[in-house]
Image (tube, rainbow, N blue to C red):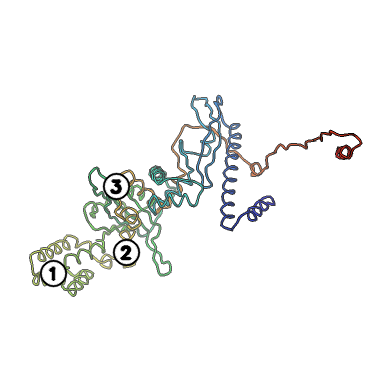
Amino acid sequence: MSQILTEIMTVLKDSNSLFDAEQNLMMQCQTLIATALGQALEDLDDLLIGETEYQEIVGKRERTLNFMCGAVTFKRRLVKLTDKKYVFPLDRYLQLIPRSRFSPLMVEKVAKLASHSVLRTTALAVNLLTPLSISHQKVGQLYQTAGTQCEKQREETTLVAVAKKRQVPYLYLEGDAFCVAIKAKHHHKNIFVHRLQLTEGITQNGQRRQTLNRHVFTGLNRRVVFKQAQDYLSQNYDLQHTTVITGSDNGSGYEPSCFDELAIGAKKHEHFLDRYHLNRKIRKRLSMMPKRLQNMLFQAVHNWDSDQIQVILDTCESIASDTDSLESIQLLRRYLKRNWNYLKPAVERSLTAENVCLGGCESNHRRFTYQLKHQGRSWSKAGLKAMVNVITSEINGQLEAAMLNVPAASPINIKPVKISASHFLKQPFTQHQGIKHGSLHLDAATSSAMSNLVKIIS
């Protein structure tokens, strides 16, 4: 510790300002950590060789990994196993992805930052806050790598059996989709991103409300997204005593019958028409009508009063001034008739208003749409799929676990290694050069003053 304090004091004294001192200290600390980490990895490789069953050691190969502290270069042994396969014991033990030049933590941080900003801003942030220097193209490759890992982790998680399934009184499932521009050869075209949101209710956090145990399913294929939700429900929940409450705009692919498949085995299933889409439809169809009639229709729909709705729509038809207005009113009438059973209030379904915690799916679109649609952005299909996977894993709290998930490889028998921390903190022995004895050339009489000086020094 005293040596470190001495080095810091030296840097503070020699620097012209605190700005230069801090910059120099950060560079020295990062260099020290990178050097020590590289040496530690080589020492760990030496220990692993004694615990690995191999036929022969082929040689040492150099590898460079970019950590948060900078680039770390180290050498590790390549061995030939008894089954004629070649492996790096150190890479296997650390679960390093083959041919990857970035540590899992670095990939996770870059992917998370890229899911909140543009690629150039992400590259700038990494270059300013770490000793690394990466381009926005490399940022794109890293978040696509992270997206692939997230998809693999989700697929493997669905195969894991849960010891005890959750039993809750109510489950809320909402679904919707939004458009994103896809790059094409001559023009941009739109593609739908499908979303399902599963929650167990809401909790009060001060003056704000938060969803409870939210889990999101997102993808470019609607059937795959619904299959993911179905697998998750069957894996984690016992629905025998659960009332499943679903909501959507009842559009194509999100009809009540689609949600019936997800609620198989539940005690009860109630489907509601999403209020946001309902209100938007009423405002759009009655945009040419007086505000008073619109408010009256909102109240009648809220009260589920069929007679009052017919009276209001008849009044609107009577004062319609053109054919387009009349057609809009007729379309609204058919829309309300088609979805009448799903406008039924919660009280009429033996539910209280507090039990119907729907409406969060639409507002939670923004976490995706702000990143995927702002500033006229367009995506390649692979890039869009990867970004959707990263954002979904981040929301579900699975991004870090996805970075720890490595592809399956051939087995290798490496026993657990117990390493003392003092082994890495031990200062290596440094060979010092001894004292050199010199002599003075004397070109004078032995009785001279110069000769007497030489005798004293010698």
Residue at mark 3 to residue at mark 2: CA–CA distance: 28 Å
Q: In terms of image quadrants, where is residue 274?
A: bottom left
x, y percent for residue 190: 24, 49
At mark 1, the secondary structure is: helix
Q: Given the current orientation, which residue lies at the most extreme right position?
A: 447
Provide the residue designation for mark 1.
313
Disc 1 packing (10 Å; few <14; some 14–19; many ≥20):
some
* Front of the two marks 2 and 1: 1
Give above or below for 298 relative to 90.
Answer: below
User: Is residue 224 rendered to the left or right of residue 456?
Assistant: left
x, y percentage for residue 39? 60, 39
Mark 2: amino acid: Val
Rounded to the nearest angstrom, the CA distance separating label 2 from label 1 is 28 Å
Locate residue 27 relative to residue 152 in the image: left or right. right
Query: Identity of the amino acid at label 1?
Result: Leu
Q: Nearer the viewer, mark 3 or mark 2?
A: 3
Of label 3 and label 1, which has the lower sequence position?
A: 3
Determine whether label 3 and label 2 are within 8 Å by CB. Answer: no
Residue pictured at 47% horizontal, 49% vertical: 127
Q: Nearer the viewer, mark 3 or mark 1?
A: 3
Judge by depth and name the residue closer to the eye, 361 or 41: 41
* Residue 220, numbered circle: 3
